[in-house]
Amino acid sequence: MKHVVIIGGGTAGTCTANALIRSLDKSEFRVTVIDFQARHYYQPGFVGITIGKIPNPALWRWRRQTLLPGIHLLQERVTKVDPHSKQVITPTREIPYDYLIIATGCQCHPELVEGMSNGNALAEGIYSFYTLRWAKKLRSVLQEMESGKLIVHISEFPIRCPVAPLEFALQADWFFFQKRRRDDIEIKFVTPQSEVFQQEITAKSLSNILRLRDIQVEPDFVVRHIDAKEKRLYSYDGKIIDYDLLVTVPPMRGQQFLIDSGLADELGFVPCDIETFQHREFPDVFALGDAADLPTSKAGSAAVYQSRIFVPNFLNYVEGKPMTKRYDGHATCIVDTGFRKSTVIDLNYKTPALTGKLFIPKLGPLSLLKETRLNHLVKRLMFPFYSVLMAAPPGLNISKLQMIGKEYTRWGLRSDGKTHVAKPRSKDSFSQLLAPTYKRRPNACLAASPKAKVLQIPILQEAGGIPIDVDREGFMTKPEQWTPEVSVDLAKAMGMELTERHWDVINFARKKYFENHHISPSLRQFELAGGISIAELFDLFQFKPAKVIAFISGLPKPVGCI
């Protein structure tokens, strides 16, 4: 009998296990889920906990209840995996497998930022909502806050559910508005990215919502350390932000045992094929959900979509047939913006989130990149519907991104959602993307958001004496065209002269990282995999070093977090 072992009983692991037990012949396959926690939590509800919207007992179920009959559940902590002998090792036993599915998610590590943690807990005056215990503690603090500066801060990417911090900032605005305290509380959203979201259309839409709510945005803030006593955030480029209440998103990592087992990269995420989820080195190992290094949102919807693609591929794989289905990076996020309204983001690897309707053209029920009460109703219904999705019912499959109903021509795209047209049909500006639908604090001054420093990437068609192919932002699309002379010319276009240390960084980015991972390294990956500190990168490349290094090295734009 073949043994399929799934490590992790979160959304990805549970959906996959339930779908497999429906599809596999139980006389030939045994499915085992290993997870050390007895409870399965509805993590999207943690933001609601902070403002008292969802009662605590409603957020969890016993893990055994989420798994269909026929699935074996082992409540143990995995300490190591031996992919060569095909064994999962726990403190009490060694479990052989024929096929391994890794769905271990990611964990918060506040100790990675100096001053953020105090032992195993967050430092005094620093809060978060990414665990139930943290969310309950933050709820009591918000109830008592009467005035001051509330800072909502993201340390670095990737993170679990990248729109959750935005949702919390908007929920806090609504909470304090209801309590008649909003005029006395300043809310600021602090992010290491250049925008509040990686994709331009969505970034402008969300920025407009934040502006209408008088929530300031501080972009390009890469935190260096936190002084909990003085209540200050310090960045690598010398910026300082004071706070009275700091709600932070700590750095997130995959599981350490995956790194120790040689199955994950330096951040703990499993390198796998972005369309089939197969491990790049061990073909009988697969990774799904937050544990995988996929360049898409680490969100519950993405995990559900991935399981729907994975299962038919897996059935083909065990029969020796090619895996024909391809995951396109589809993820859907419903953001509760407060005031009983929500907005919807729907995207994939290559198609940005667009305006329009989902799932029926002109009818919806979901309106994309627009605040509506119907969106909010669907958001509320997702909580009870979550259990249905976990059971992986047959026939319910929306894993592929739908272009039907999307206003792609409005934003200068063809019907494939990827190819740009010469002239967009619409003359809409981004400032018109969102109109106020209610009268917000009539005495408040909705000043224009302060302009952030912008990195100017020159768009060159030739460098190093040869023609080069670049994208709309100036990054090379064919790294094989690179030569050292190309880097010299690209650096000159940025006003830089390359030193020996610059070349050390470039060589690591190209030869030691990109050739193995096929993506441009992040700042943290330079530090962990290359031994080059983030502080030194800022000294060498000044502003937005990850992007500058990718540009000069002839690599694609860093993925960031979508």
Image (cartoon, rainbow, N blue to C red):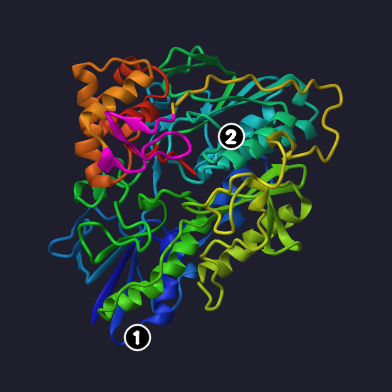
Q: Position of residue 539 (x, y in %)?
A: 33, 15
Residue at 35% in and 64% down:
276
Majority secondary structure of magenta residues: loop
- Residue, far left: 85
222 vs 38, nearest the viewer: 222
Residue at 22% in and 44% down:
515
540 vs 289, nearest the viewer: 540
Residue at 74% in and 31% down:
212
Q: Position of residue 302 (x, y in %)?
A: 49, 57
The three-letter code of the residue at mark 1 reads: Asp
Residue 507, located in which quarter of the rendered image? Answer: top left
Q: Position of residue 303 (x, y in %)?
A: 46, 59
**Image-based side of 372 in relation to 394, left or right:** right
The three-letter code of the residue at mark 2 reads: Leu
Q: Which residue is mark 2?
A: 138
Q: Position of residue 388 (x, y in %)?
A: 57, 70
Dot 2: element: helix
| Label 2 or label 1, whichever comes before in sequence order | 1
How would you rate the neighbour count of disc 1 (Cα within 10 Å): few for under 14, some for 14-19, many for 20 or more?
A: few
**Image-based side of 170 in relation to 473, left or right:** right
Residue 374, located in which quarter of the rendered image? Answer: bottom right
Q: Is residue 19 above or below residue 484?
A: below
Q: Which mark is residue 56?
A: none
127 vs 517, nearest the viewer: 517
Magenta range: 459-481
Q: Which mark is residue 25?
A: 1
Screen quadrant of the N terminus: bottom left
CA distance for labels 2 and 1: 47 Å
Magenta stretch: residue 69 in it? no
The reply to whether callout 2 and callout 1 are in contact (CB within 8 Å) is: no
